[in-house]
Image: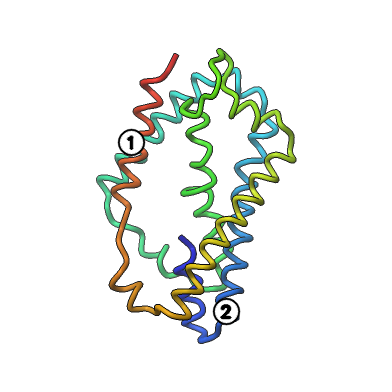
């Protein structure tokens, strides 16, 4: 969701080079956010022993967050007004809260189970025991895909579509996001062994 900020940076500075600088800042922030989540998990094999407790705690946390977001429907305004100089920090924080951090939740909720085992499932085991290289590869590939797709959208909006699209064509998926979190948490609690 950083591409609107890249478009905004380019429009504020009236320069297409600002679009690319903003995309680079977003990519760096997102990559660092991914690494901040993935690297510790790749080093903490002992978490498999606590998989059930982690699953219960994570499911309750995700349900609670979903309920909070469903009740409190106001999107924080400070997230929409980010100056270009703070895009890397914004991207890092959003990657932790919205993307990279929550990307691991289904693994620890037990929803991604690929084999039936008492100690966990293959997805978590591969991530945690597969080495630092796997965590780095996941972070790099994910960040590249994120910045490539967002960059294409940002370039198209900046170059051809313009601000009218953003002001009239924008739709809010916050309630869908909240309900999906509640659903994921509920499925996790129902699939506990």
- Quadrant location of residue 183? top left
Q: Secondary structure at mark 1?
A: helix
Name the residue located 63 percent from the left edge and 60 percent from the top edge.
Answer: 28
* Residue furthest bottom in the image: 14
Residue 66 located left or right of residue 97 = left
Q: Relative to the observer, which residue lies in front, 53 or 136? A: 136
Name the residue located 60 percent from the left edge and 54 percent from the top edge.
Answer: 143
In the rendered image, residue 139, in percent from the top left (x then y), is placed at 64, 48
- Quadrant location of residue 138? top right
Classify the position of the N terminus by image quarter: bottom left
Q: Relative to the observer, which residue lies in front, 160 or 38? A: 160
Q: Which residue is mark 1?
A: 182
Q: Which residue is mark 2?
A: 18
Name the residue located 37 percent from the left edge and 78 percent from the top edge.
Answer: 163
Name the residue located 70 percent from the left edge and 45 percent from the top edge.
Answer: 136
Give neighbour class at mark 1: few <14, some 14-19, many 20+ (Cα, 10 Å): many
In the rendered image, residue 120, in percent from the top left (x then y), is placed at 57, 20
């Amino acid at each position: 969701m950083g591409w609107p900020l890249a478009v905004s940076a380019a429009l504020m500075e009236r320069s297409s080079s600002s679009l690319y600088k903003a995309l680079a800042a977003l990519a760096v922030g997102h990559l660092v956010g991914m690494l901040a989540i993935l690297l510790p998990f790749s080093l903490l094999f002992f978490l498999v022993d606590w998989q059930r407790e982690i699953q219960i705690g994570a499911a309750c946390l995700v349900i609670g967050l979903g309920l909070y977001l469903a009740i409190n429907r106001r999107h924080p305004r400070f997230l929409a007004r980010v100056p270009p100089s703070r895009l890397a920090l914004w991207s890092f924080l959003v990657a932790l809260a919205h993307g990279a951090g929550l990307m691991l939740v289904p693994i620890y909720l037990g929803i991604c189970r690929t084999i039936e085992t008492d100690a966990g499932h293959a997805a978590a085991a591969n991530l945690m025991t597969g080495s630092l290289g796997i965590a780095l590869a996941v972070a790099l590939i994910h960040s590249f895909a994120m910045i490539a797709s967002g960059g294409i959208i940002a370039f198209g909006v900046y170059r051809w579509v313009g601000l009218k699209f953003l002001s009239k064509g924008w739709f809010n998926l916050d309630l869908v996001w909240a309900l999906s979190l509640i659903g994921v948490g509920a499925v996790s609690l129902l699939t506990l062994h």
